[in-house]
Image: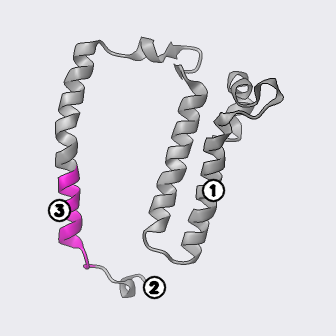
Amino acid sequence: MSIWTPILDPVVAEKWFGNGVITAFVIAPIFALFCSAMLARALLRYQEHAPFVWSVGIFLASLIGLASSLYPDLVPRAVTASEAASDSFTLVFMMLGIGLLIPVMIAYNVYQYFVFRGKVTSSHYGG
C-alpha cells in the first residue's frame, strides 16, 4: 500500500508529496514499517501475544493510510463518501442493530477464551 498507491495514483502522490514536501500522510506507512519490524522481532523471540498486536498495527496503519489517501473518494474518481452513504433512517437502524450485537459478540469471545484457557501448552507445538 505504502509503495504502490502513490506510484499508481497521481492524486495520492500529490497529497503525500505535494509542493516537494512530505506531508502527514506518510505517518501511516512509517508506523506500518515500525510494526513490521516489531513483528519480526517478536516472532524471532517466540513471544506469544506481541505478534498479534503488531499485526493489528500493520492492518490499522494500512487501512488508515489508504482511507486517508483516497478520501473523499471510496472508489477512486467514481464514488464519493457522500454519494455512497445511505439515508439517515438506515444508518440509525444499522447503528442500533450493530450496537446491540457487538457487546454480545464481545461477551461470547470473552467466554470462549475463558473456557478454553490453558488447554494448549508450549509442549504441544514444540516451544
Note whether 119 is above or below 70 in the view shown.
Answer: below
Q: Is residue 63 above or below residue 84?
A: below
Residue 13 image position (x, y, % from top left): 73, 28
Residue tagged 2: 127
**How far apart, in angstroms, are the residues tagged by discs 3 and 2?**
26 Å
Q: Check disc 1 and give the amino acid type.
A: Phe
3 vs 2, front mark: 3
Q: Secondary structure at mark 1?
A: helix
Q: Which residue is mark 1?
A: 34
Which SS does the magenta portion mostly show? Answer: helix
Residue 3: in magenta span = no
**What residue is shown with label 3?**
111
Q: Give me the C-alpha separation between circle 1 and circle 2.
A: 26 Å
- x, y (%) of residue 62? 56, 43
The stretch of residues the image draws in magenta is 106-119
Amino acid at dot 2: Gly
Residue 49, position as x, y percentages in the image: 43, 68
* Left or right: residue 92 compared with residue 28: left
